[in-house]
């Protein structure tokens, strides 16, 4: 395992739905790291596993914030993670709205393909950690092992109603990473 793919909102930071303006992280002060994230990212870095973020951020094309402000938020996120001992190898965002019907908006897989090409890797057997149904659907389409975390916007009860369920469910990113690393050792 060379890399894992993760969603951003609800995995790395508190999902902005319902408590921020427009339900998006539009400024740094609304970006709140979830408990255990720094520990998890440090553990992955020490094991030589790249972390690649794949996230839908339609708020840009909806006009709630700019691509430049998204880049600034991302730079600060990476800076904080590195300061705490972790690393993010790359970040891919789809800034399109659902109705744009692009190839990169999850559950479509354009961003995965872009990441695979750039990093010379494949998804089959890799993990994708997310907090929503579109994350699980996208991961499945790419042949990833899907991991759902309960730290985001979707409850276990909602998840249990999905036709396509994740391969594994954990309370949060740290729990998922501990389990993944344990599997790797076995």
Image (cartoon, rainbow, N blue to C red):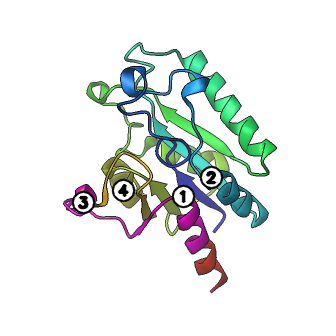
Q: Position of residue 51 (x, y in %)?
A: 64, 53
Q: Provide the residue designation for mark 4.
A: 136
Q: Position of residue 134 (x, y in %)?
A: 33, 48
Query: Looking at the image, do the residues carrying marks 2 and 4 touch, with CB atoms under 8 Å apart?
Result: no
Which quadrant of the figure contains the C terminus? Answer: bottom right
> Which label is found at residue 37?
2
Q: Is residue 179 above or below residue 141?
A: below
Which quadrant of the figure contains the N terminus? Answer: bottom right
Could you say which is closer to the camera, residue 41 or residue 167?
41
How crowded pointer 2 is (Cα within 10 Å; few <14, some 14-19, many 20+) is rated as many
The span picked out in magenta is 158-180
Q: Which element type, helix, strand or loop, lies under badge 4? A: helix
How crowded pointer 3 is (Cα within 10 Å; few <14, some 14-19, many 20+) is rated as few
Q: Provide the residue designation for mark 3.
A: 157
How crowded pointer 1 is (Cα within 10 Å; few <14, some 14-19, many 20+) is rated as many
> Of callouts 4 and 3, which one flags the residue occurring earlier in the amino acid sequence?
4
Q: Is residue 172 part of the magenta span, yes or no?
A: yes
> Of callouts 1 and 2, which one flags the residue occurring earlier in the amino acid sequence?
2
Q: Provide the residue designation for mark 1.
A: 173
> Which label is found at residue 4?
none
Q: Which element type, helix, strand or loop, lies under badge 3? A: helix
- Residue 20 occupies quadrant: top left
Q: Is residue 137 part of the magenta span, yes or no?
A: no
């Amino acid at each position: 395992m060379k890399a894992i793919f993760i969603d951003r909102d609800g995995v790395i930071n508190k999902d902005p739905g319902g408590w921020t303006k427009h339900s998006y992280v539009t400024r740094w002060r609304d970006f709140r790291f979830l408990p255990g994230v720094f520990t998890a990212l440090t553990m992955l870095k020490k094991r030589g596993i790249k972390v690649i973020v794949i996230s839908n951020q339609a708020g840009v094309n909806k006009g709630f914030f700019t691509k430049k402000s998204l880049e600034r938020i991302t730079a600060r996120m990476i800076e904080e993670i590195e300061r705490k001992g972790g690393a993010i190898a790359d970040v891919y965002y789809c800034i399109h709205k659902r109705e744009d019907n692009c190839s990169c908006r999850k559950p479509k897989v354009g961003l995965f393909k872009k990441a695979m090409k750039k990093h010379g890797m494949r998804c089959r057997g890799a993990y994708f950690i997310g907090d929503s149904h579109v994350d699980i659907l996208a991961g499945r389409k790419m042949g990833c092992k899907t991991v759902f975390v309960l730290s985001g916007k979707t409850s276990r009860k909602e998840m249990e109603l999905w036709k396509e369920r994740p391969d594994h469910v954990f309370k949060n990113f740290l729990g998922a990473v501990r389990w993944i690393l344990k599997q790797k050792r076995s």
